[in-house]
């Protein structure tokens, strides 16, 4: 069994790219991270870069000592706490970016146990046999409207409060990530998509299922999804980033 990945991190129609992603994949485990610096805050590209790289660094250090410990929920929480601390430290050193902050979505797995963690509206989708099994819930006012029954989940994409977040990393008030735990082995046919709102806003969940089902590789699936996105975006579309990861049989 192998985990195959493909990723994109594009500027879109914005002046610069505040998204950042990082990942490490090995035979005994993987950690995937996607971050989206908040575009209205100067220096958020620094926050997203520090967050993603720090999580991978923390995961790698723990995994070198104990592979099973590296995917325990409390350690996955600690990776994100460490990233938050690093962002805050950088903001204290550089007052120009004192308002910067970021979202984060992370998958850590040893292929027997998997932890999905996130803050903000960068999402993780988990598919089994190319069917959506789980998706994270955004930390946004629009998600609250969904929970209250005011709008359907699909309408988050066009809701006026979609970009009003209730939880971010690097702010003065740190709230730990939501963690979802899967204590069962990953199987061929399982897939993950980690993506920023600049991606999922234009690619619908049923389309992700379709593209995964007809694609032999994550590169092919991601290319199909990006084509859907590019056919729909406006001139000044947001940065967009995604990681597609597929569990495949060993050959």
Image: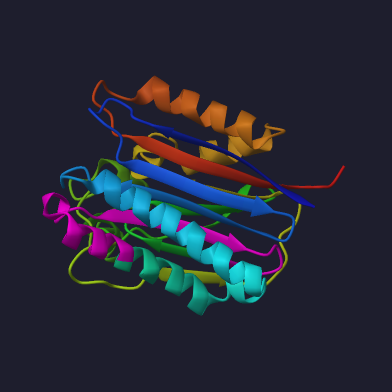
Which image quadrant is residue 235 in? top left
Q: Which colour assignment does the render follow?
A: rainbow
Q: Position of residue 50 (x, y in %)?
A: 35, 53
Q: Position of 226 compared to 89: left or right?
A: right
Which image quarter holds the C terminus?
top right
Q: Residue at x 33, y 25 (%)?
A: 233
| Extreme residue toward the bottom, this view | 74
Is 249 rendered above or below residue 70?
A: above
Is 202 rendered above or below residue 123?
A: above
Q: Which residues are magenta?
A: 86-115
Q: Position of residue 110 (x, y in %)?
A: 68, 65
Is 182 rendered above or below residue 223?
A: below
| Viewer-nearest residue: 199 or 127 | 199
The answer to whether residue 180 shows anywhere in this view is yes
In the rendered structure, does residue 94 fall within the stretch colored magenta?
yes
| Viewer-nearest residue: 99 or 203 | 99
Q: Residue at x 57, y 76 (%)?
A: 72
The answer to whether residue 167 shows anywhere in this view is no
Q: Position of residue 93 (x, y in %)?
A: 19, 59
| Extreme residue toward the left, this view | 95
| Viewer-nearest residue: 222 or 80 | 80
Q: Residue at x 63, y 37 (%)?
A: 218
Q: Position of residue 231 (x, y in %)?
A: 40, 20
| Viewer-nearest residue: 111 or 221 | 111
| Extreme residue toward the front, this view | 93
Q: Residue at x 34, y 58 (%)?
A: 138
């Amino acid at each position: 069994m192998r985990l195959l990945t493909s990723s994109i991190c594009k500027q879109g129609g914005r002046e610069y790219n505040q998204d950042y992603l990082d990942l490490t994949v090995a035979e005994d485990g993987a950690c995937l991270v996607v971050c989206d610096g908040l575009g209205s805050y100067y220096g958020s590209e620094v926050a997203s870069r520090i967050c993603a790289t720090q999580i991978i660094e923390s995961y790698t250090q723990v995994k070198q000592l104990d592979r099973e410990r590296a995917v325990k929920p409390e350690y996955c929480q600690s990776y994100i706490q460490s990233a938050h601390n690093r962002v805050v430290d950088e903001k204290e050193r550089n007052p120009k970016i004192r308002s910067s902050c970021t979202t984060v979505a992370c998958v850590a797995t040893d292929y027997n146990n998997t932890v999905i963690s996130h803050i903000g509206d960068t999402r993780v989708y988990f598919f089994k046999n190319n069917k959506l099994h789980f998706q994270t819930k955004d930390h946004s006012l629009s998600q609250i409207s969904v929970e209250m029954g005011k709008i359907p989940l699909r309408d988050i994409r066009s809701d006026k409060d979609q970009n009003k977040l209730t939880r971010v990393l690097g702010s003065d008030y740190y709230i730990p990530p939501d963690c979802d735990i899967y204590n069962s082995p990953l199987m061929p046919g399982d897939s993950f998509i980690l993506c920023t709102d600049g991606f999922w806003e234009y690619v619908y969940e049923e389309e992700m299922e379709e593209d995964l089902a007809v694609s032999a590789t994550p590169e092919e699936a991601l290319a199909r999804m990006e084509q859907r996105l590019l056919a729909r975006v406006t001139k000044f579309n947001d940065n967009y980033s995604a990681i597609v990861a597929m569990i495949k049989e060993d050959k």
